């Protein structure tokens, strides 16, 4: 459905009604129980709230980003868990789409936009933060890439189908940061080296990466990423 002011206005009213009604009930439940009910995800998915920002060719509603933010302002009146679910799932496709192959677009990005596949954005680290100071590194060994480091406070980190990983290319300059994308969690081999900080050493085959190679990125916090090289 193409974007029109009339349909957008109706959508804003619909979301406002949801936030004031079912959204408030979910918020009360989360505050009382300390957990997010599984029904919340299904409710948001069935209403199409995970596909607001993605373009129509990915199965999204194609709402312009500045207008999408108007919707997020409404969602933000509800519990933080509601805003997080809607905003994260509406955003991860942006980092993958520029580099994805046609197969990855069909099998990962479109299902993610639909809410059928869950992608976790894994940037934050316990000893570094969420900026250019990340310490995780990645190197290629034959037909695999090996990631060494730790990630911390990752939304969907233990529930996702894929991790969207940020790491430095091992041996490169400090400013070089690489995106490492779309490795199905059950396909990884991991060894725990600490039960406190939870650093891991992962090995994954080349094929799950977004695109045909791993790309260095100049921007990580913006709406898109720009390739600056590959190992």
Image (cartoon, helix red, strand yellow):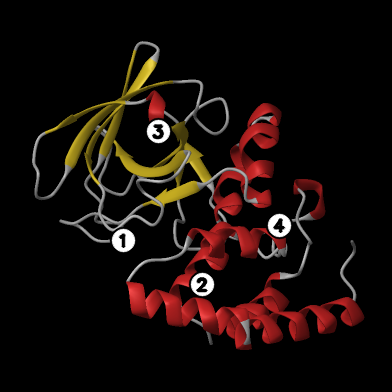
Name the residue: 44% across, 82% down: 28
Q: Vertically, is 74 above or below 113?
A: below
Q: Residues within 10 Å of mark 4 (few under 14, many from 20)?
A: many
User: Horizontal and vertical percent for residue 104?
Assistant: 63, 31
In space, the residues marked 3 and 1 are separated at their CA atoms by: 22 Å
Q: Which residue is mark 4?
A: 54
- Side (left or right) of 34 relative to 113: left
Q: Nearer the viewer, residue 230 or 21?
A: 21
Q: Nearer the viewer, residue 196 or 116?
A: 116
- Side (left or right) of 16 relative to 181: right
Disc 4, disc 3: CB below 8 Å? no
Q: Which residue is mark 3?
A: 185
Q: Which residue is mark 2?
A: 82
Say what secondary structure mark 4 lies in. Answer: loop
In space, the residues marked 4 and 3 are separated at their CA atoms by: 24 Å
Q: Which mark is residue 130?
A: 1
Name the residue: 46% across, 56% down: 219
In space, the residues marked 1 and 4 are separated at their CA atoms by: 24 Å
In space, the residues marked 2 and 1 are separated at their CA atoms by: 22 Å
Q: Which mark is residue 73?
A: none
Q: Quadrant of the N terminus?
A: bottom right
Give whichever of discs 4 and 3 has the lower sequence position: 4
Q: Nearer the viewer, residue 177 or 130?
A: 130
In space, the residues marked 4 and 2 are separated at their CA atoms by: 18 Å
In space, the residues marked 3 and 2 are separated at their CA atoms by: 24 Å
């Amino acid at each position: 459905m193409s974007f029109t002011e009339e349909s957008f206005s109706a959508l804003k009213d619909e979301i406002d009604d949801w936030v004031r009604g079912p959204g408030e009930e979910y918020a009360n439940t989360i505050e009382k129980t300390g957990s997010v009910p599984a029904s919340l995800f299904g409710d948001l998915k069935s209403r199409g709230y995970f596909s607001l920002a993605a373009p129509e060719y990915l199965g999204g509603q194609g709402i312009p980003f500045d207008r999408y933010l108007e919707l997020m302002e409404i969602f933000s009146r509800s519990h933080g868990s509601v805003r997080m679910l809607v905003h994260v799932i509406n955003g991860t496709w942006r980092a993958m789409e520029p580099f994805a192959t046609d197969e990855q677009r069909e099998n990962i990005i479109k299902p993610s936009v639909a809410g059928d596949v869950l992608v976790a954005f894994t940037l934050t680290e316990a000893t570094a933060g969420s900026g250019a100071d990340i310490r995780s590194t990645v190197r290629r060994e034959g037909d695999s890439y090996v990631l060494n480091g730790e990630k911390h406070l990752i939304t969907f980190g233990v529930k996702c189908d894929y991790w969207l990983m940020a790491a430095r290319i091992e041996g490169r300059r400090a400013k070089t940061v690489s995106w490492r994308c779309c490795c199905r969690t059950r396909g990884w081999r991991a060894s725990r080296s600490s039960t406190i900080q939870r650093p891991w050493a992962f090995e994954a085959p080349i094929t799950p990466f977004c695109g045909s190679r791993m790309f260095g990125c100049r921007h990580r916090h913006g709406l898109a990423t720009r390739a600056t090289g590959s190992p």
